[in-house]
Amino acid sequence: MVVANRLAHETSPYLRQHAENPVDWYPWGDEAFALARTEDRPVFLSVGYASCHWCHVMAHESFEDPQIAEALNARFVPVKVDREERPDIDAVYMEAVQALSGHGGWPMSLFLTPDGRPFFGGTYFPRRDNHGLPSFRRVVDAVDEAWRHRRDEVESQADSLTKAIEQRAIVPGKPVSGGPHEATTAASARLLADATAELAMRFDPEWGGFGPAPKFPQPTLVELCLRQHRLTQDPSVLAMATTSLDAMAAGGIYDHVGGGFARYSTDATWTVPHFEKMLYDQAALVRTYLHAWQATGDERWRQVVDETVRYVLRDLAAPGGGLCAAEDADSEGHEGRFYVWTPDQWHATLGPELAQSAADWYQVTPAGNFEGASILRRPLGAALARPPEIEEARARLQAARSERVRPGRDDKVLTEWNAMFCSSLAEAAAVTGNREWERAAVDVGEFLFASLRRGDGRWLRSWRGGEARHLAYAGDYAWLVECCTRLAELTGRSRWLERARESARDMLRLFAEEPGLLHTTGTDAERLVVRPTDVFDGAMPSANSVAATALIRLGALTGDNETATAGAALLEALMQSARRHPLALANVVVAAGYAAGAATEVVVAGDRADLLAAVRRRYEPTTVVLWGERTSSPLWEQRADGAAYVCRQYRCRAPALTVDDLEQHLEAELDADRAVAGGLSCARVGTAADAETES
């Protein structure tokens, strides 16, 4: 008999997937923990997300099993959490799993005391004992036995784990000893050089990427390479970026039929992906490929941007507005079935006139490269631009694929992920001049403001079917500030700067702790066993690094010193950890390029589309652009129409009346940064030589 659990009333598609399990699931909340206290039962906490393949496997093997469900229902209070809706819960309890096992992942399976302290857990547990993993039923029985007969041990373990979580949550929260002046252009260049030197040791020179399989795109690490090449013109650094971008775009991790990227590759050659597609991956990769196109002029990267944006706007558009969170890896119960091609499917779709030429182009063979079928890919280094015959084949493949059962779509709209994609899309629209993208970016921004704020102005995290839930987190606010500043630069409309300032003020009020960093949860949020702080980069850049960049950029655009100072203080609080672990805080290394006046401010006054286009098409990653409606920013003071003004810390060069003048001014700013980086390199060479002589 199916138990009518409470998840049917939730907005999360992941929770609703479990609404008909025989497990009597509760959503996270007071009701579940009150029952646990009243009946003296542990809480079983299961955390996952809708497009998680192994979450589906464990659900099928264990949560749909009536005997396991009976044991869970009788001895525990089962609680199900969507990690994408509740990243605070996920962050806290993932620390416990990592402390217990040395690794983490999803599904996450934890057992808690009725007051929320974890005492045992792991990730995926199989149906039967397998490869050193105990079966889930054996785990359930062992935990129940310990709870009933060895309570002292359980309580001691809960105390120890909670202390471990608290210790792991402690991060440097004060500026480094050098004070605010430490975040200089030279310090930023030094940090960037150290990061890329460490990156070179992890780089796969044949297939790109950083580290062994499984390989994740890690676009922030590619950004580090592009930044360092911009300063040093070192071809080996650029090669790390272009080899990685080329290998990903050629590989099966990229959808050559419909556009967009899968989450990661299971092999070193980027051929076999884990097929789910996440909105945040598309957002980050659109920005990185856009920057690579700006930096190199390679049209392959522009094609990837075009096709990835097209995929998101076509396939992730949510009913009612906004963008859906993800698409699943599975369809019809099989991972990747939607994307792969058997020989019979290939020939039936393309016919004798196209099958062979398209097979040569996409490396399709009778044996296949994935369970007897083929994942499409291009040879490494080969062209991506399709000749007419291949484009006809691709169109036929897409039409045939559209008749298949699509992977499940997680149609919740997350504030953070939408703001992240909106930021990238706004930047891409500005660089390319694509008006359709501009309209789409504005639409996403307007949807967020219309649908994901309460009447009192408090932002919420998740929306689905007309209902918004869950208090927004620091990451939501940070990306909203970034999104609004990018929309201001795209449209020239002052309303976006005002919205950015309002969101920034609320972010600092709700999440900042002086002196220090932003907590993940607001002062008005539910209290967990630990109040988490998002510092290290994971699948997405940390909330604190995004906030630092967004605040500094907003301060530069508006002339609001308080906002800029808040961003600089966040950056300073992160720098000490970044010096020790530059790749774990790679986005801090990127953000450091804005520190201490390193940002270049460009004002384009009046109707000078040519000047605006000239600054936009360049790879100028630490430049902010003000144009259109005049605001109270000091950057607008005494700015005559018809010219562009290039400034740094409000010290401006002569007005640029032509594109050539503007290009010269921007090159002069770049030369100044290169001089600092070059001086640093010379100083290091001298130090190394001296050390060698002394030895």
Image: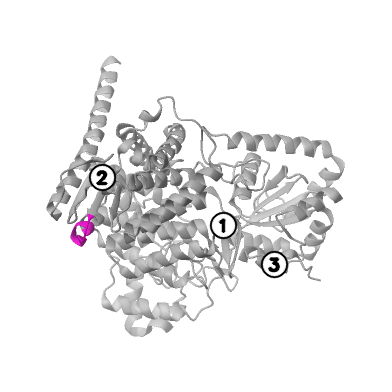
Considering only order in the chain, which callout, 3 or 2, is on the residue closer to the N terminus? 3
SS at mark 3 in the image: helix
Considering only order in the chain, which callout, 1 or 3, is on the residue closer to the N terminus? 3
Q: Which residues are magenta?
A: 605-613
Whether residue 206 is visible, yes or no, is: yes
Q: Which mark is residue 230?
A: 2
Q: CA distance from mark 3 to mark 1?
A: 17 Å
Instruction: Say what amino acid the circle numbered 3 marks.
Output: His
Q: Quadrant of residue 583?
A: top left
In the rendered view, would you say 419 is above or below 335? above
SS at mark 1 in the image: strand
Q: Nearer the viewer, mark 2 or mark 3?
A: 3
Q: Quadrant of residue 519?
A: top right
Left-right relation of 238 to 316: left
Which residue is disc 3 drawn over? 9
Q: Which mark is residue 141?
A: none
Left-right relation of 235 to 588: left
In the rendered view, would you say 537 is above or below 310? above
In the rendered view, would you say 569 is above or below 628? above
Where residue 319 appears, x then y in whole percent?
52, 73
Q: Quadrant of residue 440?
A: bottom left
Tell me the crowding category of disc 2: few under 14, some 14 to 19, or many 20 or more residues within 10 angstroms, Cα based.
Answer: some
SS at mark 2 in the image: helix
- Residue, x 46% and y 40% (percent of image)? 584
Q: Nearer the viewer, residue 681 or 361?
A: 681
Where residue 693 appears, x then y in whole percent?
25, 17
Q: CA distance from mark 2 to mark 3?
A: 52 Å
Which residue is disc 1 drawn over? 461
Instruction: Say what amino acid the circle numbered 2 marks.
Output: Arg
Where residue 245 appears, x then y in whole percent?
34, 55
